[in-house]
């Protein structure tokens, strides 16, 4: 069969595993994966999260065990979320040195030393009784709003508490204006200029966070549309990312990941700092639900989704599959 261009055969480079390996453009490595973990105050035994099969709410003891597994698997780090026993209007538990998140950071740092990165989520929503990412106030027209600047003061104190507890990395995720700069200044003033700021720079008001709300026993009513980004916007992400870099962000993150690969690619092409992405709880739950029904091959979809996120431009990925994927890769 003679057809035009028959000399040119792209299939030649797909013939064997050896040649496919040679020409592969994107490679996954455990070192680029970060495991998000949940730890609950006064919990007696790890508790499964219904909407995230295979993920649990940890006790301090089971968290320490998972941290050891993270080191053994050679993953890049663990991002810790704390769920306090009591919540209040200003999220006091977040700044309390003995609060669950700071206690957990201390326990994990003690366990892993510098063998993997200890990261702390820097946000108030797990600690507030209203479930918002900041403290509430009233605007000029009498509307209840999340008070941006009052929240910044809380973030500054929280960052210092996390650094003192032993965090290598803090992850401001509340989408308040100016949060990165305020956190950077507070860390520097407290002598923690070596603590890294991983900024949740482009964070969308996403329905994909649904299962996370169960994971942190969230008490949120309403939504976060007045501070997180509209899923319809791309240009806005470039602005948010530029502002965070200007304010000293060491790494910028796009979140969620798979539904926002266009944003991720654009951000990666624009900035000169490392770029991260967060494969969020709803992305995890979708894969788990379909796999449980036998509709997709879990392991192949896990690796394909992580490969796609990497191909789009993420140098590192927060994923609940971090340990599982590291095993698949190993
Ligand atoms: C806020 C925070 C959220 C997630 C990570 N950090 C929830 C939110 O913004 O509503 C979601 C992560 C996930 O869905 O896996 N502290």
Image (cartoon, rainbow, N blue to C red):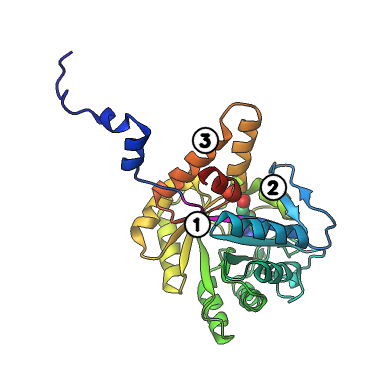
Q: Is residue 13 left or right of residue 55?
A: left
So how many labels did they put on this image?
3
Label whose residue precedes the other's in the sequence (1 or 2): 1
In the image, is 15 to the left or to the right of 112?
Answer: left
In 3D space, how far apart are the residues under numbered discs 1 and 3 (Cα atoms)?
Answer: 19 Å
Q: Earlier in the sequence, mark 3 or mark 2?
A: 2
Q: Measured from the top left, where is residue 78 in percent x and y?
A: 61, 60
**Viewer-nearest residue: 242 or 98:** 98
The question of residue 30 being in magenta is answered with yes
Q: Position of residue 37 (x, y in %)?
A: 66, 56
Quadrant position of ligand 1: bottom right
Which residue is the site of mark 3? 300
Region in magenta = 29-35
* Distance from Cα at disc 1 to Cα at disc 2: 21 Å
Q: Position of residue 328 (x, y in %)?
A: 54, 43
Answer with mark 1 or mark 3, whichever residue precedes in sequence: 1
Mark 2 — residue? 55
Query: Mark 3 to mark 2: distance in Å?
Result: 19 Å
* One can see residue 170 in this view: yes
- Is mark 1 in CB contact (under 8 Å) with mark 2? no
SS state under label 3 = helix
Residue at image x 59%, y 37%?
287
* Image vertical order of residue 173 relative to residue 262, above or below: below
For label 1, the SS is: helix
- Residue depth check, mark 1 versus mark 2: number of the one nearer the observer: 1
Q: Residue at x 65, y 74 (%)?
A: 162
Task: Give yes or no for residue 34 being in the magenta stretch.
Answer: yes
| Residue 19 in which image quadrant | top left
Q: Which residue is mark 1?
A: 31
Q: On screen, 74 above or below 50?
A: below
């Amino acid at each position: 069969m003679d057809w035009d261009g028959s000399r040119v055969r792209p299939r030649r480079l797909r013939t064997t595993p050896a040649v496919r390996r040679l020409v592969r453009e994107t490679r996954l490595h455990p070192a680029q994966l970060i495991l998000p973990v949940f730890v609950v105050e006064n919990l007696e035994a790890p508790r499964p999260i219904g909407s995230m099969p295979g993920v649990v709410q940890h006790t301090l003891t089971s968290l320490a065990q998972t941290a050891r597994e993270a080191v053994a698997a050679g993953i890049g780090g663990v991002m810790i979320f704390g769920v306090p026993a009591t919540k209040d209007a200003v999220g006091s538990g977040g700044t309390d040195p003995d609060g669950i998140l700071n206690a957990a950071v201390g326990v994990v740092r003690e366990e892993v030393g510098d063998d993997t990165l200890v990261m702390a989520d820097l946000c108030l929503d797990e600690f507030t009784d209203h479930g918002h990412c900041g403290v509430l106030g009233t605007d000029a027209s009498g509307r209840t709003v999340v008070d941006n600047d009052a929240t910044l003061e809380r973030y500054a104190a929280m960052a210092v508490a996390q650094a003192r507890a032993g965090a290598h990395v803090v992850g401001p995720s509340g989408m308040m204006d100016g949060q990165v700069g305020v956190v950077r200044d507070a860390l520097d003033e407290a002598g923690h200029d070596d603590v890294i700021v991983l900024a949740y720079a482009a964070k969308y008001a996403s329905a994909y966070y649904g299962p996370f709300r169960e994971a942190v026993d969230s008490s949120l009513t309403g939504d976060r549309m007045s501070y997180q980004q509209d899923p319809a916007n791309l240009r806005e992400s470039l602005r948010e990312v530029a502002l965070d870099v200007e304010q000293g962000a060491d790494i910028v993150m796009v979140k969620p990941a798979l539904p926002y690969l266009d944003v991720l690619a654009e951000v990666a092409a624009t900035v000169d700092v490392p770029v991260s992405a967060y494969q969020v709880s709803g992305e995890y739950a979708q894969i788990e639900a379909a796999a449980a029904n036998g509709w997709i091959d879990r392991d192949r979809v896990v690796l394909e989704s992580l490969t796609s996120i990497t191909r789009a431009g993420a140098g590192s990925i927060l994923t609940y599959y971090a340990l599982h994927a590291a095993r698949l890769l190993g």
